Image: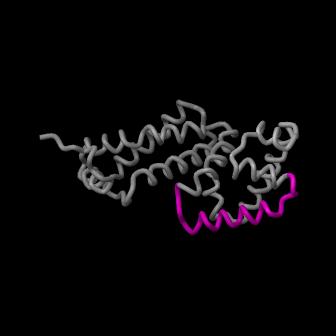
Amino acid sequence: MMKAYESYSDIELLSYLKAGDHLAFNEIYDRHWEKLYQQAFRMLRDEATTLDVLQEIFTWLWANREQVQLNSFAGYLAMAVRYKMANYIRHGKVRLDAFKKIADESLKELNTTVDSYEVKELQTIIEQFTAQLPARCREIFHLSRSAWLTNPEIAERLQLSEKTVENQLTIALKKLRLHLAKHSHLFFLFL
């Protein structure tokens, strides 16, 4: 009789995974692969690197299955993708513009992916930082990062050139990275 793995919870699958059950691993992979692929590809826009990252994550999961402690694979694997992306950037394995994509994506997902003290502290620091920006720069930053408008949409709304919007965002993000460097324990979350 076949086990109905698709009906098992993450905790049940984890116990089978720890026992070396390949079918449980396959179910975990099937449940989460597509969403993780989309998350990583949105950040990198490079299929080969995205597939490498996912292979490394799932290979690590299998190799370390006996030590894994978690309540939900979704959050655990999503965070693993973010950490792996940061490592790829740190080691120069992806283009520099991927850093900006990861930072943008991370800010969008901070409120939904992780609910922790560090994230709340990071949000407070970013809010304090943006309050100190010049009015126009603060408005552009807010429309980009809070209202999720594109540069052309912001330019149209504020009757500015797209280049001006892009320059203001670049300046704000550079200043923010420098500001966050003072809080190095939180800087990695921003990645």
Q: Is residue 1 left or right of residue 44?
A: left
Helix, strand or loop for the magenta stretch, by majority: helix
* Tag count: 0
In the picture, the quarter occupied by the N terminus is top left
122 shown above or below 103: below
> Magenta includes 88?
no
Q: Is residue 88 left or right of residue 15?
A: right
What residue is shown at x 59% (from left), y 48% (from top)?
86
Q: Position of residue 88 (x, y in %)?
A: 58, 43
Q: Which corner quadrant of the image does residue 70 belong to?
A: bottom left
Q: Nearer the viewer, residue 33 or 154?
A: 154
Q: Which corner quadrant of the image does residue 124 belong to?
A: bottom right
Q: Position of residue 161 (x, y in %)?
A: 87, 37
47 shown above or below 10: above
Span highlighted in magenta in the image: 113-136
What residue is shown at x 57% (from left), y 69% (from top)?
117
Q: Is residue 92 left or right of residue 164?
A: left
Color theme of the render: one colour
What residue is shown at x 31% (from left), y 44% (from top)?
25
What is the residue that sits farthest to the front in this orientation? Answer: 157
> Magenta includes 122?
yes
Q: Nearer the viewer, residue 151 or 10?
A: 151
Q: Is residue 85 left or right of residue 78?
A: right
What residue is shown at x 37% (from left), y 59% (from top)?
71
Q: Nearer the viewer, residue 38 or 183?
A: 38
Q: Position of residue 6 (x, y in %)?
A: 28, 43
What is the residue that sits farthest to the left in this orientation? Answer: 1
